[in-house]
Amino acid sequence: MDELKALIEHMAKALVDKPDAVSVQETDGEKTTIIELRVAQDDLGKVIGKQGRTAQSMRTILNAAGTKLGKRCVLEILE
C-alpha cells in the first residue's frame, strides 16, 4: 500500500508552499486503509481548496487507485 501513500504525498507536495512540512501516515486495516495527511497550517487551505473541491478530487483519485488494489481508502486531512 505504499503506492497510495506515495500518491497522496506527491499530490500534496505539488499543492503546498512548504513541501517539507507534508507528512503522510497510513493505517492499514483488513478492508480499509486510512491515510492521514498533515500539512503546515498556512497550506491547509491550499490542500482543501474552495468549498473542499481539491480535497474531494484527491479523495476521488485515491478511491480509484485503491479500487485497482482491492482496498477501500479514506483520506483524512489533519491540522
Image: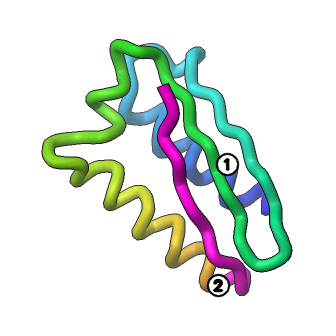
Q: Which mark is residue 68?
A: 2
Query: Looking at the rendering, which quadrant does residue 46 occupy?
Result: top left
* Side (left or right) of 54 relative to 35: left
- Vertical relation: 40 (above or below) 4: above
| Region of the chain picked out in magenta, as a range | 68-79
* Side (left or right) of 18 relative to 53: right
Mark 2 touches mark 1? (CB < 8 Å)? no
* Side (left or right) of 37 relative to 40: right
The percent coordinates of residue 64 (x first, y second) are 51, 77
Q: Amino acid at mark 2?
A: Lys
- Vertical relation: 18 (above or below) 9: above
Instruction: Give the residue furthest to the left.
Output: 50
Q: Residues within 10 Å of mark 1 (few under 14, many from 20)?
A: few
Front in this rendered view, residue 57 or 76: 76
Q: Residue at x 71, y 71 (%)?
A: 32
Q: Which residue is mark 1?
A: 6
Asked whether 54 falls inside the magenta stretch, the response is no
Q: Residue at x 22, y 53 (%)?
A: 53
Asked whether 78 falls inside the magenta stretch, the response is yes
State the quadrant of the N terminus. Answer: bottom right
Q: Residue at x 71, y 86 (%)?
A: 70
Mark 2 → mark 1, Cα distance in angstroms: 16 Å
